[in-house]
Image (cartoon, rainbow, N blue to C red):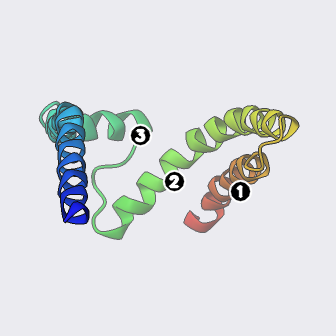
Amino acid sequence: MTDTINNSVQHQQQEHTMQSTIRKHAGAVAAWLAVSAIVPLGFFLAGGANIVRNAAGIDKTTDGLGKFVNAADALVGPATIAMAAIAPLACVVGAGALMFGNRRGITIIGAALGTLIFVASVSGIVQ
């Protein structure tokens, strides 16, 4: 009999905990959903794709796969420069993490260098 009462009380406590957790995070989830719906809509309505196309100097006259190749070719230079600037900072952060005993430090360094190599190799793939 007491086991049944204890199980009932535990079940009620778990249910209350789940409800309070849902209530606590409902606002954040709603805000995230609203932002994830509004940002792409604003980007589309403001002509954000045209801004990127004009800034990169992508030609509008090509069709099909040529558009994609021209876009990748125009964006790979700035992406390589950005990664070349970020990679040393990420290596310093990874080294600092290793010094303080974090095992993920080597992963940070490897990811930074791997991304730099990948972005630099895209120019060879595109051309």
Q: Nearer the viewer, residue 57 or 103?
A: 103
**Dot 3: element:** loop
Comes first in the chain, label 1 or label 3: 3
| Amino acid type, mark 2 | Asp
- The residue beneath circle 1 is 114
> Residue 87 placed where, x, y %?
72, 39
Position of the N terminus by quadrant = bottom left
Q: Nearer the viewer, residue 91 or 78?
A: 91
Comes first in the chain, label 1 or label 2: 2
The label nearer to you, 1 versus 2, is: 1
- The residue beneath circle 3 is 57
Q: Is residue 1 left or right of residue 70?
A: left
Task: Identify the residue at horizontal 77%, vertical 40% (top origin).
Answer: 94
- Near mark 1 (Cα within 10 A), the count class, few <14, some 14-19 or many ≥20, is few
Q: Is residue 105 left or right of residue 72?
A: right
Badge number at residue 73: 2
Kindly report the distance in space between the C-alpha atoms of the residues bearing marks 1 and 3: 28 Å
Position of the C terminus by quadrant = bottom right
Comes first in the chain, label 2 or label 3: 3
